[in-house]
Image (cartoon, helix red, strand yellow):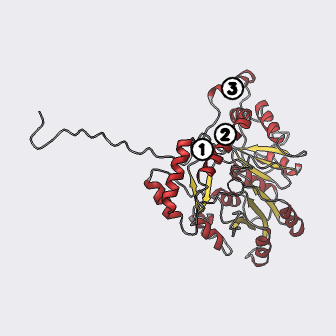
Amino acid sequence: MFSRGFARSSAPAVKPIEPLVIARPELPQAEALLPYLRRIDAARWYSNFGPLLTEFEARLTARFEPDTQVVTCANGTQGLALCLQALQLAPGSLCAVPAYTFVATAHAVISAGLIPYFLDVDPDTWTLQPHTVREALAHAPAPVSAVILVAPFGLTPDLAPWLELREQTGVQVVVDAAAAFDAVHSAALPTVVSLHATKVLGIGEGGFLATEDHRLAQRVRQLTTFGFRGSRDSQMPATNAKLSEYAAAIGLAALDAWPHNRLRWLRAAQGLRAATTHLPQVAFQPGWGLSWATSVCSVQLPDGMAATVERGLSEQGVETRRWWGLGCQTNPAFADCPRGDLTQTDRLGQAVIGLPFSIDLDHEQISRVAAALAASVD
């Protein structure tokens, strides 16, 4: 019997809203890996450029134009750093980087013994522009030896004007194509791609350099393996940044599934685009989900609106993330690094947010994101 003053409630309990998370990576499952793992068991070759890694690099190379070489490494950040190191640039010189990028870009510059020089980006493509670099060369506080051109979230820039800049100025240009596995097929400029678990083709941790410069490829390879080249004598200061046969097994299984998985990424992206066509305040990157696939969805809102929309989405259980924050230059690690005028980077930092996106984003989840956006941008 209930105590006096209390009554039995017949109202059903309110089910809490399940959060819609920002990302749900998907790597090859155990069944897909098993044939490759059995090959490792049979060969008893586990690292040091075994048959699976050789095959993985060959299949990656086949995605590029003829005469390209691919060198795998432990992760994309190492790939950038070792590429810069292999170019034998003047120690302590400046490397121009877009301020609107992930911190890995600047960390790679510092690891290579250079100093990041933050420059502004184009407000429409979010990329560094050649004319910005040319102007900066005349006013830089120290010699500029290199530029890292970032492909923002997978959107690849036109390389022709950058090849011209390199030829005319002697400044080396490296492409940080961390998220652009799907879109990059030319390596006229040294190009580094990430194979992190969060990318469209992921292996957990990994990356690779693609380049038409065979001497550069050879030097980067040597830097990934203690400076060895054909002997047990270390020829240069280097590191250990090799991929194992197990990482290659995941990569091979991921490549097997890539044609189908690419369509899944594009289908999810196009569903999200279609569901938000009635929201002119929400702008997707040019070609996102139409001509190229990537694993994140970053949209641009009206100036200064990011924080308001983030709060609105959070209240509805929809997770967001500013993947590049307010710009790389705002991180304490880079407080002392030189920079130019960053007006557009500051604007983008207050206007761009990442929405929940995954390879298996379904109709119900897409509708939920679209409805939450509609309520928040109003």
| Label 3: element kind | helix
Q: Is residue 376 left or right of residue 286?
A: left
- Is residue 225 visible to us here? no
Q: Horizontal and vertical percent for residue 346?
A: 60, 70
Tell me which label, 1 or 3, sits earlier in the chain.
3
The residue singled out by tag 1 in the image is: 358
Camera-nearest label, 2 or 1: 2
The residue singled out by tag 3 in the image is: 37
**Looking at the picture, which amino acid does disc 2 mark?**
Arg
Q: Nearer the viewer, residue 322 or 52?
A: 322
How many angstroms separate mark 2 from mark 1 (CA)?
A: 9 Å
| Label 2: element kind | helix
Tell me which label, 2 or 3, sits earlier in the chain.
3
Which residue does the image show at 82% across and 57% down from the upper left?
87
Report crowding for label 3: few under 14, some 14 to 19, many 20 or more residues within 10 A (C-alpha): some
State the mark number for residue 264.
Answer: 2
Q: Is residue 57 left or right of residue 341?
A: right
How many angstroms separate mark 1 from mark 3 (CA)?
A: 27 Å
Q: Horizontal and vertical percent for residue 131?
A: 79, 72
**Looking at the picture, which amino acid does disc 3 mark?**
Leu
How many angstroms separate mark 2 from mark 3 (CA)?
A: 26 Å
- Labels 1 and 3 touching (C-beta < 8 A): no
